[in-house]
Amino acid sequence: MSVSSQFAKTDTSRAVQLALTNRDAWSVCQNLGWALRYAPNAAVEEICGLIERHARECRDDYQRAAVRAWQIRALSERGLEAEARLVLAAALPVAVIATPQSSRAEALFLLFQAAFPLGPETVGPIAQKLLACRETPTHWRVRRNLVCATAMLLRHYPPSFERLRLQIADEKVLGKIVREAQRPSCEPRAFFW
């Protein structure tokens, strides 16, 4: 937990100020995400603007897309689901052009986890994009993220999983997905605590 995130729940102005002192845009955005999660309603729009600006300054497409996950989850946890979906809609086109394929899969999986509370109609298409990441040879991170994302769908949103299942021909991968879905740790990551 960063210094700015320690102030997020009690002093939004201080949390934002400290977030902006970071040297790299990724850290700025993560810390602003913490501030956004706990900020008063009047500060939400301003903090979202700061995150958007600093996300554009990240060094590559992976970072520019993936770092928006903290903003998406913060908005979702605040009950601002429409706003979270708009941020996701802006981040996904950047995520799908991230290279190499392992970075693309990592960005998509982070966005998938951030958006998970928004429901199957939102995360199902992200899992579909993860499935489309498979290239030959498939990087281990692509396989891992595909297994984890589809296992979360199987565990929480079975109809969404069934739509993807038809596109996964590898029985070994399907077996891994079923086993992963049975593990208690098969949950989206926490972004704030």
Image (cartoon, helix red, strand yellow):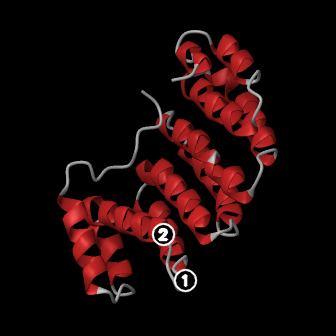
Location of residue 104 by image quarter: bottom right
Residue 101 visible in the displayed image: yes
> Any mark on residue 142, and which?
2
Task: Please state which of residues 5 and 41 is positioned toward the viewer in this rendering.
Answer: 5
Q: Residue under label 1, please give it.
A: 135
Tell me where residue 160 sits by quadrant: bottom left
Residue density around tag 1, few if under 14, some if 14–19, many if 20 or more, within 10 Å: few
Residue drawn at x 53%, y 86% is 136
Give x and y (percent) for residue 169.
34, 89
Dot 2 alpha-carbon crowd within 10 angstroms: few under 14, some 14 to 19, many 20 or more: many
Marks 2 and 1 sit apart, C-alpha to C-alpha, by: 9 Å
Q: Which is more N-terminal, label 1 or label 2?
A: 1
- Secondary structure beneath disc 1? loop
Q: Amino acid at mark 1?
A: Glu
Look at the numbered discs 2 and 1 and tell me whether their residues touch, using CB distance below 8 Å: yes
Q: Is residue 83 above or below residue 5?
A: below
Place of residue 150 in the rendered image (x, y in percent of width and height, measured from the top left)? 35, 68
Q: Amino acid at mark 2?
A: Val
User: Residue 90: percent from the left, percent from the top?
Assistant: 70, 57
Kind of element beneath mark 2:
helix
Is residue 124 in sight in this rendering? no
Taking the spot 32% from the left edge, 60% from the top edge, the residue there is 152
The C terminus - image quarter? top left
Closer-to-camera residue (179/124): 179
Q: Is residue 135 above or below residue 83?
A: below
* Disc number placed over residue 31 in the picture, else none: none
Task: Please tell me in which quadrant of the rendered image residue 135 appears.
Answer: bottom right
Give percent across and percent down for residue 31. 63, 28
